[in-house]
Image: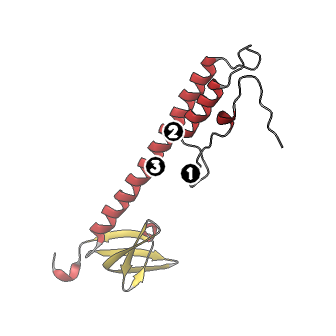
């Protein structure tokens, strides 16, 4: 089967490939490749050509979206670091957690991490950070 190309199209432009990220989204480099291919293959008669200001507008929107995505990722990382720092400060302190209807108080022995979340261990049992209701100094050491 032979390929049919429109005016100004060539076989190299139609074989341009893009790479998908792990979530299936295109990155900035992919957008630039597509935009370059579109510009290279514009109809010289102007029939199917897009206004160049549209490309600039699309690029500005794509850049803004990319920056918002980067900001969101940075905020997520900051949140994780903050949670880690707070959980580290719990070790060796007395904490109270609500386990269902029961209030449990004990010394935070250690903190475990699973899937980016901190779980303080009190009396040998792991609890979620959102279950912690009170934190104080260890009363047994006289501090």
Q: CA distance from mark 1 to mark 3?
A: 15 Å
Q: Which percent across, then down, holds residue 44? A: 70, 15
Above or below: residue 143 compared with residue 63: below
- The quarter of the image holding the C terminus is bottom left
Query: Which of the numbered marks, if any, corresponds to residue 65?
Result: none
Residue 137 to residue 70: above or below? below
The residue lying furthest to the left in this view is: 142
* Residue identifier under label 3: 73
- Could you say whether the residue bearing mark 2 is in a helix, strand or loop? helix
Q: CA distance from mark 2 to mark 3?
A: 11 Å
Residue 90 lies in what quarter of the image?
A: bottom left
Label 2 sits on residue: 66
Which residue has dot 1 on it?
21
Q: Quick one: label 2, few (<14), some, or many (20+) residues within 10 Å?
A: some
Instruction: Farthest residue to the top: give it.
Output: 45
Q: CA distance from mark 2 to mark 1?
A: 13 Å
Q: Nearer the viewer, residue 34 or 77?
A: 34
User: Is tag 2's residue or tag 3's residue first in the polypeptide sequence?
Assistant: 2
């Amino acid at each position: 089967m032979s390929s049919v190309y429109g005016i100004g199209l060539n076989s190299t432009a139609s074989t341009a490939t893009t790479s998908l990220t792990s979530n299936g989204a295109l990155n900035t480099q992919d957008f630039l490749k597509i935009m370059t291919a579109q510009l290279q293959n514009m109809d010289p008669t102007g029939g199917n050509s897009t206004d160049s200001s549209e490309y600039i507008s699309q690029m500005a929107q794509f850049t803004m979206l990319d920056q918002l995505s980067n900001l969101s990722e940075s905020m997520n990382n900051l949140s994780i670091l903050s949670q880690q720092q707070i959980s580290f400060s719990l070790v060796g302190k007395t904490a109270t957690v609500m386990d269902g209807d029961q209030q449990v108080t004990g010394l935070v022995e250690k903190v475990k991490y699973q899937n980016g979340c901190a779980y303080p261990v009190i009396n040998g049992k792991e609890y979620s950070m959102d279950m912690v209701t009170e934190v104080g100094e260890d009363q047994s050491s006289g501090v």
